[in-house]
Image (tube, rainbow, N blue to C red):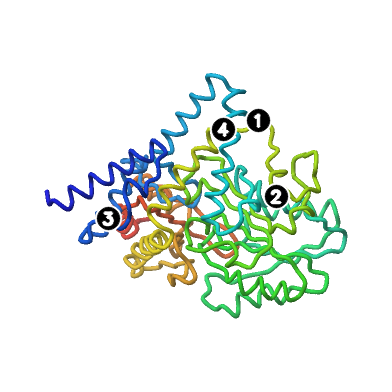
Amino acid sequence: MHPSRRSFIRQTATLLGAMALHRNPAAAFPIAELPENTPEEDFWRQVRQAYSASPTIINLNNGGVCPTPRATLDALDYYNRMCAEAPSYYMWRILDQDREPLRENLAALAGVPSDEIAINRNTTEALNTIIFGLPLTAGDEVVLSRFDYPNMMNAWKQREARDGIRLVWVDLDLPSGDEDYLVDAFVSKITEKTRLVHLTHVINWCGQILPVRKIADRAHAAGAEVLVDAAHSFAVLDYKIPDLGCDYWGTSLHKFLCAPFGTGLMWIRKEKISRIWPLLSNDQPDSDNIRKFESLGTRSFPTEMAIGYSLDLHNFIGPRRKQERLHFLKNYWMERVQDVPGIRFYTNPDPKWSCAIGNFGLEGWKCTEIAGQLFDKWKIHTTTIDWQKINGVRVTPNVYTTTDELDKLVRAVKGLKK
């Protein structure tokens, strides 16, 4: 074995061990010390070893929930066993205090002050907190899209039925690489009665990236606020929350940050915290303390504490490098099946308009037929999308996905038979 490769593998093993002990991975494996001649694919194969990825099923539905890194699983087991020994002591007197360092680390990745983010369970909880907490009254208008996530659309429909607000729907023709079209689709719906514009940063159905900042700036100019669903953009795209120019934001950490299942994050601009009612009761509901949104009752402290280990791995890889890899993997398989007869892509391959998620369909095929063959014959796990004008299969690799696995996907798509 080449000396530099032995060194690379040894350093990577040191990194994973350090993460399991919750040490700073940068001290064990500084990026600057990586051998300069390490092949790119070798680096990503070592990253794969950090994950508990199945060796028998090719998981290409990372847009749903991502596998948890091995170090995170070890931490989760450790904290669960700790709490089981004396729950009320370790949960309320020890781990409850550790949420603050975690909050600071997550805030650093998000690029916002730590007193503006709340740790919760998922995007649905984060955005529902805001949707139901906003002081809206009958006649107020909210602009949203039919490509938003169903849980969010249903929350808005509930407010419409309960409070008499008016929902103004945006119809989109996707995929699109026309920025003016995408901006105008939302801005044209804004009136003097518009109180908020709901934007999905990366649309889960097809991976379309929306020009959130430009829409947000126009919305603010018209006196409206902006809420962003970042479930499929956080830890995928290399950005900070202030880059979006929004007022409210929520995400799931069990997606591309690969944190334990049932972890999420909510951000509210500091001056707006006091006006948002908590979804669950708090003794000071009009407080400007972001922690008022964390009154969840008994919660899984081990799950929360283990987030930090997934965050360590994400920071070790680096946001920019991760985004570039995810885009590369998406285009890798799409480019190799573009000549398949009858194929149609519901995803724009341009990195400005998509990253990890790719969606394709075949003329004369139902999406369920395609996905069924992919799994039954090749053990390739995807998900089907039959929504609006999309009838396709969503393919979402992650950083642990190898090009060998995507080569198998390409062979499978080319071999589909009625």
Percent x, y for residue 226? 69, 64
- Image quarter of residue 184: bottom right
Instruction: Looking at the picture, tell me which residue is in the foreground, 61 or 74.
Output: 74
- The disc at residue 95 is 4
Give the image quarter of residue 329: bottom left
Front: mark 4 or 2:
4
Determine which of the numbered discs, if any, sits on residue 33 in the image: 3
For disc 2, the marked residue is 128
Q: Quadrant of the C terminus?
A: bottom left
Residue at which label 1 appears: 298
Identify the amino acid type marked 3: Glu
Can you give x and y, in whole percent of width and height, for residue 196 in the image?
A: 74, 64
210 in relation to 391, above or below: below
Residue sitting nearer the eye, 340 or 121: 121
Residue at left offset 71%, top offset 52%: 154
Identify the residue shown where x is 83% and y is 70%. Answer: 193
- Earlier in the chain: of badge 2 and badge 1, it is 2
Q: Secondary structure at mark 1?
A: loop
Residue 415 appears in the picture as rendered: no
